[in-house]
Image (cartoon, rainbow, N blue to C red):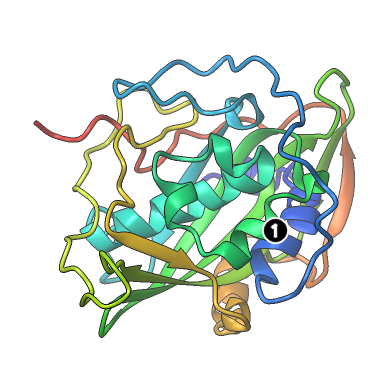
Amino acid sequence: MDSEAVNTRGAARIAAAVLATMVSVAGCGSPDTGTDATPEPASPCADGSGGYRPPAQVCESTVVWSAEPGIDLYSSEATLARAGAEADFISGFAGPQYAYPGYSDAIDPERAKRYKNDIYRGIHSGTLLTHLQEIQPTQDGFHVKYCVVFNEIAVRRDVVGDDLIGSYDRGSAVGVRFTRAASDPGAPATTAAPATRYSPAPDRLHWQAPTSNVFDGWTVSFPEGEDVTDRAGCDAWALSLYPDAPEKNESIDLATAPPVQPAYPGWPAPPD
């Protein structure tokens, strides 16, 4: 990533101040004052080969993933982790009904309650930077730690307005558990494999999305307190990109949205 992109403080301050509230404090309660009936603006995103169309709130943005040494972003576990994180973003930005196929059925009910708060809504422009820190197997699935910074994305809260708000800080640390779902309460957990391995997408300057249900056979939860399990590690990663990033969020009024970086790895159709 070049210095010009890194130093663009046109990123998600309300995403960091607002979404970081949702992403990094998963265990804390939030008022259920929003509604899923909020009118959805027409989406300029193209349909994927499987028919999924990302909502307008993310069409002007991308997600760029990196990982600690030894973690393969294309592995089945990392693929499912990426899908879960991105579906979580969409659910906060637009509502869970617009997230990736199967996510609303897989997500933990406590997390789902948070998506009803429409203060997280808005049109997001630019790039979300995310870093996969750790994947640990568990008896019935696996546990993931990842970091996210919003310093390269801006939000327009009013879908018909021009006001852009960016953010600048060290981002958030997130802990997520993926558990193989049981077919009924008395049945053992399934041995369903994680997501299909995908290959890089051809068009990477627009929001990418899996075109199939990668969450089939899984439940996704954000256990209380695990969002701060490796805050120091996330700080180290964020400071490697933004050496002067403050610990607390700084909101910034922007004249223009930050540039969109190519999505990585992206979500083409799965292999035949």
Q: Residue at (77%, 71%) from the top-left corner?
A: 29
Residue sitting at the far left: 272
Reply above or below: 53 against 32: above
**Quarter-of-image position of residue 67:** bottom left
Reply above or below: 172 against 150: below
Task: Identify the element where label 1 is drawn.
Answer: helix
Question: On the rendered structure, is 125 left or right of 98?
Answer: right
- In this view, the residue in front, 259 or 78, is 78
Question: On the rendered structure, is 144 left or right of 3?
Answer: left
Q: How many marks?
A: 1
Q: Residue at (40%, 54%) from the top-left corner?
A: 82
Reply above or below: 196 against 23: above
Question: On the rendered structure, is 51 left or right of 257?
Answer: left
The amino acid pointed to by label 1 is: Arg
Residue placed under numbered mark 1 in the picture: 114
- In this view, the residue in front, 68 or 185, is 185
Residue 65 appearing in the image:
no
Give the percent coordinates (x, y) of residue 223.
55, 78
Q: Quadrant of the C terminus?
A: top left
Q: Residue at (67%, 42%) from the top-left corner?
A: 93
Give the percent coordinates (x, y) of residue 171.
67, 63
Give the percent coordinates (x, y) of residue 77.
27, 63
Give the percent coordinates (x, y) of residue 41.
70, 19
**Quarter-of-image position of residue 56:** top right
- In this view, the residue in front, 251 or 187, is 187
Q: Residue at (55%, 83%) from the top-left corner?
A: 230
Residue 27 appearing in the image:
yes
Q: Pointer 1: residues within 10 angstroms few (<14), some, or many (20+)?
A: many
**Quarter-of-image position of residue 234:** bottom right
